[in-house]
Image (cartoon, rainbow, N blue to C red):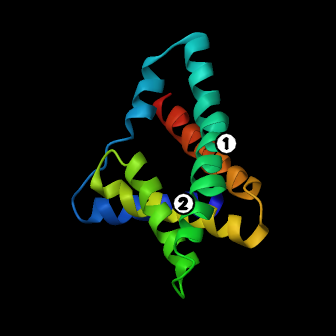
Amino acid sequence: GPALLLLGAGWGFVLERLGYTPEPQQVAEALLREQGWVQVCAMVFVALLAPVLEEFVFRGWLLPVVGRGLSWHRHGRNVALVLTSLGFASMHADAPWALPPLFVIGFVCGWLRFRSGSTWPGVLAHAGNNGIALAVVVVGAS
C-alpha cells in the first residue's frame, strides 16, 4: 500500500516537472459528483469489491492460465507476470501517463501471488492502494 502510494506520488511529481498535469481517473471524478448512499456504495466498490474481483480474475485465474500456456518457455512464469500486468494496466488506464504505475501495481500483486501461493495478499495490497488513493481524492476535494 504505502510503497505503491509513494510510486504514484513520485510518478505524479515527474509528470508535473515535465509540464504535464495528470487528470484524476474518471472513477474518482464520478465519485466526487455523487452524494449520499450512492457515493458510499461506489467507494465500497472501489476500495473493497473491485480489488477482490480484479485480483481473482487477473492473479487468481489469468496469471496461472497464461503461465501454464507459457510453461514451455524458460521464463514463462515471468513473461506471464509481465503480460498480465500489462493487461491489468491497459484495462485501468484512462491516459498513457497512468500505465507505468498501474503496471507496477499489477506486477506487485502478481509477484505476491507467486510468492505466497495465494491471491489474498494481492487483494490486500490492491485494496490498500485503492483505499489510500480514494482517501487522497476525497480529502483533496473537501
139, 116: nearer the viewer: 116
- Label 2 belongs to which residue? 105
Q: Give me the residue at 61% from left, 12% from top.
A: 37
Is 73 left, or right, of 11 in this rendering? right
Kindly identify the amino acid type of the residue bearing the numbered disc 2.
Ile
**Residue 129 visible to the viewer:** yes
Q: Give me the residue at 63% from left, 50% from top.
A: 55
Q: Determine the secondary structure under disc 1.
A: helix
- Label 1 belongs to which residue? 52
Q: For the image shown, how many numbered marks are present on the structure? A: 2
140, 75: nearer the viewer: 75
Is 37 left, or right, of 35 in this rendering? right
Kindly identify the amino acid type of the residue bearing the numbered disc 1.
Val
Q: Position of residue 83 (x, y in %)?
A: 45, 66
Quarter holding the N terminus is bottom right
Is 77 left, or right, of 140 in this rendering? right
Q: Position of residue 130 (x, y in %)?
A: 59, 44
Q: Residue most toward the bottom?
A: 74
14, 65: nearer the viewer: 65
Q: Position of residue 35 (x, y in %)?
A: 52, 13
Q: Position of residue 49 (x, y in %)?
A: 65, 34
Q: Disc 2 vs disc 1: which is toward the camera?
A: 1
* C-alpha distance separating marks 2 and 1: 14 Å
Q: Determine the secondary structure under disc 2.
A: helix
Q: Residue most toward the top?
A: 36
Q: Give me the residue at 48% from left, 25% from top.
A: 31
Please determine whether, in this image, residue 37 is positioned above or below residue 81. Answer: above
